[in-house]
Amino acid sequence: MAGFLYFIDGHTDRVHDANLREWRLTHAFDRVPFNSPITGSTPSGEAGTLIVDQSRLGPYQPRFLPELQHWERVPGEAYWLGFYHEAPPTPVDLSRKVMSDGYLVELTGGFQWRVPLVRKFLSPSEHDTCLPRYRQMAYRIDRTTVWVDGDIQREYAHLVDIAHRFWDNWLSSLLKAANEKKPDFSIELDHPEKDAAALLGANYVVSEFELSALRVFSNDDNHAASEVLRLSCDCRNAMAWMADNEGS
């Protein structure tokens, strides 16, 4: 068992919730974790603060040990990201307490990651979701009230936008290929890794930076990120339904 270590360059004061928001680390921590100022030998060579979720670190120490750890600067951010050479974080180490149901996908390294089923296919005009939802009051026909599953919870709303954008692109490409009698089709995606990382972040304490550090996407398998997107939209079931109902 192992998790990530984070080093905040130049910060040596106490860490507060507002800092986590400022550093855009709320995906990794839902409360202020273990934190310790360090000087001298640090990832950047300058003073800063090490922050670690000790519950995910297992038997490993929340210390900067460069001979035992891999560290890299996160582009455009205020922090460095590290992990122990002998125990890179795995999906099991990074799983959130509450996981959304969905499909498994194998990424580089051979590990299985669970992709949340954001847009569950029911029919061409109907879909559902496995994302967490609020319970809300609704009226029956007789004007009595009942509690029902309502809106998707706010912290997952951006995933709906990602999934629907991909679905519209995928479906239009599929229908165009069908009209042109083409057996296969491809779609152009601007940033599949970024969107795939956001989807995986629903079930794991990761962003695109942690996934980059783990090298889960490779250029000899450039369909991996697209497969995450397809699974989030239930494209396999959609294809199966269309095959079963072709010509009807």
Image (cartoon, helix red, strand yellow):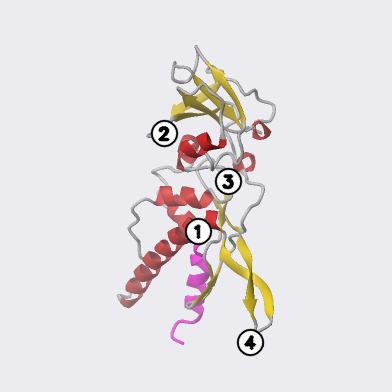
Q: In this picture, is 72 found above or below 224?
A: above
Q: Residue 182: which numbered mark, if any?
A: none
Question: Residues in magenta?
Answer: 233-248
- Residue 113 picture location, percent across and down: 57, 49
Q: Is mark 4 on a helix, strand or loop?
A: loop
- Please tell me whether residue 62 belongs to the stretch shown in magenta: no
Residue highlighted by disc 1:
157
Q: Are marks 4 and 3 in contact (CB under 8 Å)?
A: no
Label 4: few (<14), some or many (≥20) within 10 Å?
Answer: few
Badge 2 local density, few (<14 within 10 Å), some, or many (20+)?
few
Disc 4 or 2, which lies upstream in sequence? Answer: 2
Which-is-in-front pick, marks 1 and 4? 4
Crowding at label 3, few (<14), some or many (≥20) Cα neighbours within 10 Å? many
Q: In which quarter of the image is the N terminus?
A: top right
Q: How far apart are marks 3 and 2 (CA)?
A: 20 Å
Of the residues shown, which amino acid type is indicated by label 1? Ala
Q: In this view, does 46 lie to the left or right of 116?
A: left
Labels 3 & 1 near each other (Cβ < 8 A) = no
Q: Could you tell me which secondary element the residue under label 3 belongs to? A: loop
Q: Which residue is drawn at 52% across and 18% down?
A: 66
Say which residue appears at 56% left-offset and 39% top-offset: 28
For label 4, the residue is 141
Q: Residue 184: x percent and y percent?
A: 37, 66
